[in-house]
Amino acid sequence: MQNQPNPLKPPKQGSARALRNRAAQSDAPVEPPELLDLRFMRAALREATRAEAEGEVPVGAVAVYDGRVVARAHNRPIRLSDPTAHAEILALRRAARKLGNYRLAGCSLYATIEPCAMCASAMIHARIERLVFGAHDAKAGAAGSVLQVLNHPKLNHRVEVVGGFMAQECSELLRSFFQQRRTAKD
Ligand SMILES: [Zn+2]
């Protein structure tokens, strides 16, 4: 271990040296927000390709807290025989377990598609701070495309929503998945 604490010199938690050490340990110490969004959405896309490899609709999600990924998940309703096993739900569950709190205040969620009503509602229950999603979903999107569950005027909790981020990559994955399924059926 490189950074073993010296028992004679207890580390000062918020000291400049401690912060520098922490920055040096981090894989991405200082990144502008747009680059962070790219990095985390790419992680969500990697999850989506995992779903695809398992024969599930390719949707992925990651939960981020304090600049770090705390949970990753992909769609698994078929594998788990669970209609609620959407990537976002699984990511929220994992993040809550990891952080030991059913409220995920301060957490951001990155998802490759606009959330459905169930996932959007779960994000509100979790008190997610920010949602970045890729493709809009004209059939089931609940961040404005079909329904307005997130930031509904009658609901108290507000979520900062960035929609259509890396939308092309995210929707291309879905498009080719469904095209392959149709070809396979012919
Ligand atoms: Zn969903």
Image (cartoon, grey):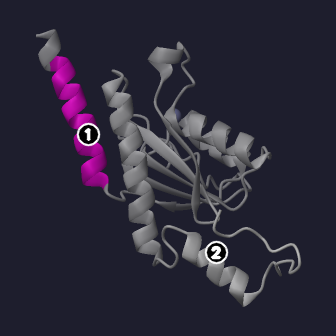
- The majority secondary structure of the magenta stretch comes to helix
Q: How crowded is mark 2: few (under 14 residues within 10 Å), some or many (20 or more)?
A: few
Does the stretch in magenta take in 180? yes
Ligand 1 neighbours mark 2 (CB distance < 8 Å): no
Above or below, 88 against 65 in this view is above
Is residue 165 shown above or below 50?
Answer: below
| Side (left or right) of 159 relative to 110 | right
Q: Which of 151 and 175 is in front in this view?
A: 175
Q: Residue at x 23, y 27 (%)?
A: 178
**Bounds of the magenta span?**
167-182
- Say which mark, if any, is on residue 22: 2
Residue position for label 1 = 173
Crowd around label 1: few <14 · some 14–19 · many ≥20 (10 Å): some
> Exactly how many numbered labels are in the figure?
2
In what quadrant of the picture does the C terminus appear?
top left
**31 sits to left or right of 7:** left
